[in-house]
Image (tube, rainbow, N blue to C red):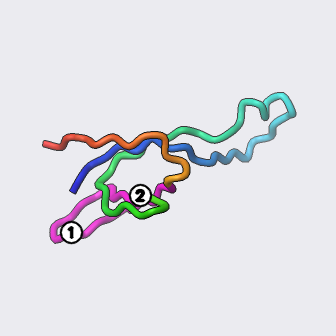
Amino acid sequence: MRVVKIEWIDASYNSSSYDKYDVREFGPVTLETVGWLVEERPDCYILAMELHPRDNFRYLCSIPKSGVVKVTGLRVR
């Protein structure tokens, strides 16, 4: 199973108050997520943050391909 780093664009949320000038600085954020590539689907990547014996996974993350900037395979020792 491959370990990958996915750079992707995600929505952001902030409950602070903004005026019309501050809002110019607010927008989507670019994230980097690292994990075991459990599955690649037509619309998303499924990563697991923890891998257990017998192919059990925990802490799954679904990343939509529409926001993916780059996928990099990582080497694990």
74 to the left or right of 10 = left
How crowded pointer 1 is (Cα within 10 Å; few <14, some 14-19, many 20+) is rated as: few
How crowded pointer 2 is (Cα within 10 Å; few <14, some 14-19, many 20+) is rated as: some
- Start and end of the magenta stretch? 45-64
59 to the left or right of 69 = left
Quarter of the image for the N terminus: give it.
bottom left
Quarter of the image for the C terminus: give it.
top left
Residue 76 lies, in percent from the top left, at 18, 43
Q: Earlier in the sequence, mark 2 or mark 1?
A: 2
22 to the left or right of 66 = right
| 61 in the magenta segment | yes
Residue 71 lies, in percent from the top left, at 38, 43
Mark 2 touches mark 1? (CB < 8 Å): no
Secondary element under disc 2, as helix, strand or loop, is: strand
Secondary element under disc 1, as helix, strand or loop, is: helix
View extreme (front): residue: 42
Question: What kind of residue is marked 1?
Answer: Asp
Which residue corresponds to the image point at 73% horizontal and 47% vertical from the top-left? 15
Residue tagged by mark 2?
45
